[in-house]
Image (cartoon, rainbow, N blue to C red):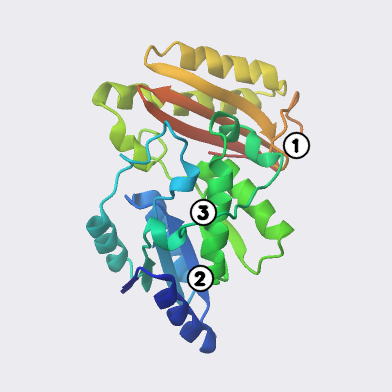
Amino acid sequence: MEIVTTVTELREKIKNWKREEERIGFVPTMGYLHEGHLSLVREAKKRSAKTVVSIFVNPKQFGPAEDYQIYPRDFKRDADLLEKEGVDLIFCPSVEEMYPAGYKTYVQVEDLENKLCGHSRPGHFRGVCTVVLKLFNLIQPDEAYFGWKDAQQVIILKKMVGDLNLPVKIRPMPLIREKDGLALSSRNIYLNSQERQAALVLYRSLELAEKQIKDGEKQAAKIKQSMIDLISAEPLARIDYVEIVDVQTLDSLEKIDGDALIALAVYFGRTRLIDNLRFISGVIEK
């Protein structure tokens, strides 16, 4: 496994692989890897001759009051995990390498970026799209792998790829959970034991929505209110949003009679966690 820190080094490696017509699978991460990230790596390895993982805590997707400075980082641990998985190359640039002095160019996907998490975190998806497009341009992957836990991110990036005619296929992969249902997240480390237990209400609220849908309930407002009531009963939970939206446009739905995304963001202490359930072609995925 090779570790590359500069654009110049990376371009040379990619140029050699492209010359040999090697198929490249790419997993972008901010590090502090967990089983969700590793599941993406394993899928990339199945489908590609070469697998690249980026580790870069992207300052452009954090707001001024968010956790950029304290975001968990442990490069040695991450590198050891990726070497065991047989990754071919880690790209771990500095902030200065990705955003040189005088950097002024950003990428936005209009309409989609200001809903759900984008409403609470203005500028977040501009930062995500900008760094992902830069990484796509540098790594030139055939396929890029993202987890469905960040459902809005997947939807926005697929739109960006389509609109800009990028020669990369976005492959969304299943959300990975702990045995008790909590969605894996690098931010879970912030939770104390009481908050960790309280956070299970997220999965219970999605299970409640699933049961109501299976029982024939189609009114989005009723499902949403039942979720809000359940989460609000947990003293340590503070709701950012609970929404039921069209899975393509992210517009709010009145009735679930087609594909839908049930998404939520909730604070436990200072830690903001997200989760979702997708209702696609009559099948619930969570």
What is the CA distance from the residue labelled 3 to the residue labelled 1?
A: 24 Å
Mark 1 residue type:
Gly
Mark 3 residue type:
Phe
Question: At 27% from the left edge and 21% from the top edge, which residue is drawn?
Answer: 194
Question: At 56% from the left edge and 39% from the top edge, which residue is drawn?
Answer: 123
Place residue 279 in its image quadrant. Answer: top right
From this view, report whether residue 255 is shown above or below residue 93.
Answer: above
Q: Residues within 10 Å of mark 1 (few under 14, many from 20)?
A: few
Q: Residues within 10 Å of mark 2 (few under 14, many from 20)?
A: many
Residue 38: image location, x then y, percent: 38, 57
Instruction: Say whether residue 73 is left or right of residue 133.
Output: left
From this view, report whether residue 196 is shown above or below residue 171.
Answer: above
In this view, the residue in front, 218 or 74, is 74
Disc number placed over residue 139 in the picture, else none:
2
Residue 137: image location, x then y, percent: 56, 68
Disc number placed over residue 242 in the picture, else none:
none
Which numbered disc, 2 or 3, marks the residue closer to the eye? 2
Question: At 67% from the left edge and 54% from the top edge, which residue is drawn?
Answer: 160
Ranked by sequence position, the earlier of labels 3 and 1 is 3
Q: Which residue is mark 1?
A: 258
Question: At 49% from the left edge and 74% from the top edge, which residue is drawn?
Answer: 48
Residue 20: image location, x then y, percent: 51, 89
Q: Is residue 178 visible?
A: no
Q: Which residue is mark 3?
A: 146
Residue 109: image location, x then y, percent: 68, 47
